[in-house]
Amino acid sequence: MARSHPIDRYRNFGIMAHIDAGKTTTTERILFYTGKSHKIGEVHDGAATMDWMTQEQERGITITSAATTCLWRDHRLNIIDTPGHVDFTIEVERSLRVLDGAVCVLDGNQGVEPQTETVWRQADKYDVPRVVFVNKMDKIGADFYRCVQDIIDRVAGKPVCLQIPIGAESDFAGVIDLIKMKAIVWNGEALGASFDEKEIPADLADKAVEYRSKLIEAAVEMDDAAMEAYLEGTEPDAETLRRLVRTAVQRRAFHPVLCGSAFKNKGVQPLLDAVVDFLPSPVDRGEIKGIDFKTEEETVRHPTDEDPFSMLAFKIMDDPFVGTITFCRVYSGKVETGQGVINSTRDKKERVGRMLLMHANNREDIKEAFAGDIVALAGLKDVRTGDTLCDPIKPVILERMEFPEPVITIAIEPKSKADQEKLGLALSKLANEDPSFRVSTDQESGQTILKGMGELHLDIKVDILKRTYKVDANIGAPQVAYRETLTKKAEIDYTHKKQTGGTGQFARVKLVIEPNETGKGFEFESKVVGGSVPKEYIPGVEKGLNSVIGSGVLAGFPVVDVKVTLIDGAFHEVDSSALAFEIASRAALREGLQKGGSVLLEPIMKVEVVTPEDYTGSVIGDLNSRRGQIQGQDMRGNAVVVNAMVPLANMFGYVNQLRSFSQGRANYTMQFDHYEQVPSAVAAEVQAKYA
């Protein structure tokens, strides 16, 4: 089977936004107009095609990125719908890693919101070109021009309008296309499938000319010939203008802005045109870097069918009918069902069984996939998110993904022996699917500990355990993931000696323990010379250090950003062993952490509260009482936005408190920002609680 579309007609893009900006609704409309779905699914009915998990349909939010393929103007669009809630940032991160472009959806009333800032930064990190769609233009308080200004003020973006709205709120009728200089007005009866091009309304003619001039001035900077012609008085024609905007988007010189109301079926077709006209194809994005599996030198793969085959697994899901499904993006070459491939990240062989093209949760079996395709593979044995699958003859490891550390934990206890068995199986599947969800066992209590990115993240995992895997369990209260670190350098000379009866034990270690750079974690180095500690005992030293690093000396929390150097030691010909050195290094590090002024660190959250003006005083007073530091406040429409940094420990149950004193009219978002030293009075309480 040959390719259905040449690779330059592929558009792999994601739809990203803050929660409730109308992202899933926009995707639903895209599927409707491209002919993928015969009726429109509504989020508020719980019938949206892309929100296919029960938890999503009940809560009206998108949790997992559903991938789907559709066609528009003879181009193949692979769309990934990503969640907008902060607790699921990891989903956005891994989608952006494999996309070539993105559509950023804004709420016309709210503008740029906290999660918009987060996804925008993530898109910057992966250099993802994007267009902006200002949605909900029919909503009360919708203000297109304020949203455009917000892009400049809040994410330092470079917005350039390709359209301006005709009317707003209930009078929103359509848009003015600044490239064609025509008004586009939708007919309500045909579910937005038909629209008319008309002359620009007289009252908007001046505004259209003003914004078209801004568009042309930004676009001609992309091309010297166009710039010269423009300075001599010749404006670029529509085709040239589109080409210049395409260049600008790919260089990330500016971000085209369109508008509409997906719910009212207005503005979606021009958005699809913009995806085809301006977002890059895999060819435009060019080669992808990797490491040669054999030589460990940098190499590249090109987006052609002739290059050796390589693909990246970016999401793993457990499907009740098919089993484990691995979503992959093919970067180079082609792959067929039945083909043997290698997971170069783990050096394991795999065989491609079923290959599926996904449409939310419907699926179509295919026999082969080509460079640029996004496909789902069923039945792979040992693949994790971020792994590379490739040609065994020319193996390559593509750039890996980085995942954030969890900041919140809960304990879970199964109610019966049968539940215990189901729980183990279910948790290993969930941890495989979501790298920001971790599972560990508390060494002392034997409890199973779940770790995640926020309360909602863990709530949904517990919900999946109960519903999908039928596990009945008791859930503990959420706890903060504290850390421990060193404040000053310490040198420890420790001897472990046990020479009474039976086999003796002897080991001496001399360690330098010092603070490391923030974010470096734990580093160990051996600078022993002259064999004072034989090579075969060094792993024992490292094992002893690691056991202390995992639980610290203050309250059982991991130690971070510490460097330990073994500088000297001594051994006994008969009584020394790896175990003796493990015991010695463990005791030495415990002593060193105490001597080095070990302190507790706590996660600090960036909190944004949007409240009616009447409650501003209560909001600020309440945040101060939670050890919060107010960073500032500004107006957004007629609401006040309060920004603060607050310790996570003081944010549990905040949503209920906020609702009660604002009569449910204020809302907030929070996301992890950094770790900071715990004040001594609070540290004493934490130690008393956990010690």
Image (cartoon, rainbow, N blue to C red):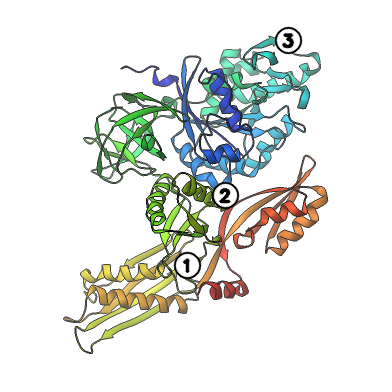
- Whether residue 186 is visible, yes or no, is no
Mark seen at residue 557: 1
- For the view shown, which residue lies furthest in the right direction? 614
Instruction: Please tell me whether mark 2 or mark 3 is closer to you in this view.
Output: 2
Check disc 3: other Cα within 10 Å, few if <14, some if 14-19, many if 20+: few
Rendered location of residue 350, percent (x, y): 26, 38
Q: Amino acid at mark 1?
A: Phe
Q: Quadrant of the N terminus?
A: top left
SS at circle 3: loop
Instruction: Please tell me whether mark 3 or mark 1 is closer to you in this view.
Output: 1
Cα separation between marks 2 and 3: 49 Å
SS at circle 2: helix
Rendered location of residue 645, percent (x, y): 65, 57
SS at circle 1: loop
- Contact check, label 2 and label 1, Cβ < 8 Å: no
Seen at 68% across and 24% down, the residue is 214
Check disc 2: other Cα within 10 Å, few if <14, some if 14-19, many if 20+: some
286 is higher (above) or lower (below) than 233: below
Q: Amino acid at mark 3?
A: Glu
| Residue at the spot of label 3 | 199
Task: Indicate which disc, 3 or 1, sits on the residue closer to the N terminus.
Answer: 3
Q: Amino acid at mark 2?
A: Leu
Cα separation between marks 3 and 1: 67 Å
Task: Indicate which disc, 2 or 3, sits on the residue closer to the N terminus.
Answer: 3
Mark seen at residue 258: none
Which of 251/325 is in front? 325
Q: Is residue 597 left or right of residue 652?
A: left
Question: Residue 419 is drawn in which quadrant?
Answer: bottom left
Mark seen at residue 456: 2
